[in-house]
Amino acid sequence: MISRTIRILGIDPGLRRTGWGVIDVEGNRLIFVGCGTVLSRENLPLSERLLAIHEGLVRVVSEHRPLEAAVEQTFVNKDGAGTLKLGQARGVAMLVPAMSGISVAEYAPNLVKKTVVGAGHADKNQIQVMLKILLPKAAPPTPDAADALAIAITHAHHRQSAMLMRKVAGA
């Protein structure tokens, strides 16, 4: 049986640093393609920071041509203004692939950690260790890029149920 290669873009949205990670999935095999971080300067107005995230992710989508994308869901923290700004960055992160006709799935941070590490409350160091096992060729330059790869891996493991949920919701 010939399996089709699925290229997945994982995005860890953030206003200062938005991590991205791209993997290929061939059957049960995960293959590292690339990862990095889109930066926006804190001294710029919010609109220009969001534009920087948009332009960076457009370059990633254009260069890597993913078939599917996944974004981490926002968790609400005590700082309402910070949560709102993160939500705006997350909106840009979802919009870029959607504008290219790429379906976008969302995953809770605890599910990402549970999928990659086996525990929903794993720390960033544990994620890095598991990434070295799951994607030996990956060397994420930042924790945000590592998180983005973890989000892509989570989508690889849960994509069938995510697609089914989209079909049910659309019916």
Image: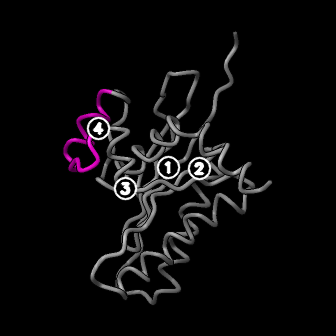
Which residue bears the numbered disc 3?
109
Between the C-alphas of marks 4 and 2, the distance is 21 Å
In the rendered structure, find residue 10 and report the number of the disc placed on it. 1
* 3 or 2: tag closer to the N-terminus: 2
Q: Amino acid at mark 2?
A: Ala
* Segment colored magenta: 118-133
Q: Position of residue 49 (x, y in %)?
A: 47, 79
Q: Magenta stretch: residue 165 in it?
A: no
Q: Is residue 161 above or below residue 38?
A: above
Give the position of the C terminus as an image quadrant. Answer: bottom right
In the rendered structure, find residue 89 and report the number of the disc placed on it. none
Element assignment for label 1: strand
Between the C-alphas of marks 3 and 2, the distance is 16 Å
Which residue bears the numbered disc 4?
117
Q: Give the number of the mark in front: 4 or 2.
A: 4
Which residue bears the numbered disc 2?
69
Q: Amino acid at mark 4?
A: Val
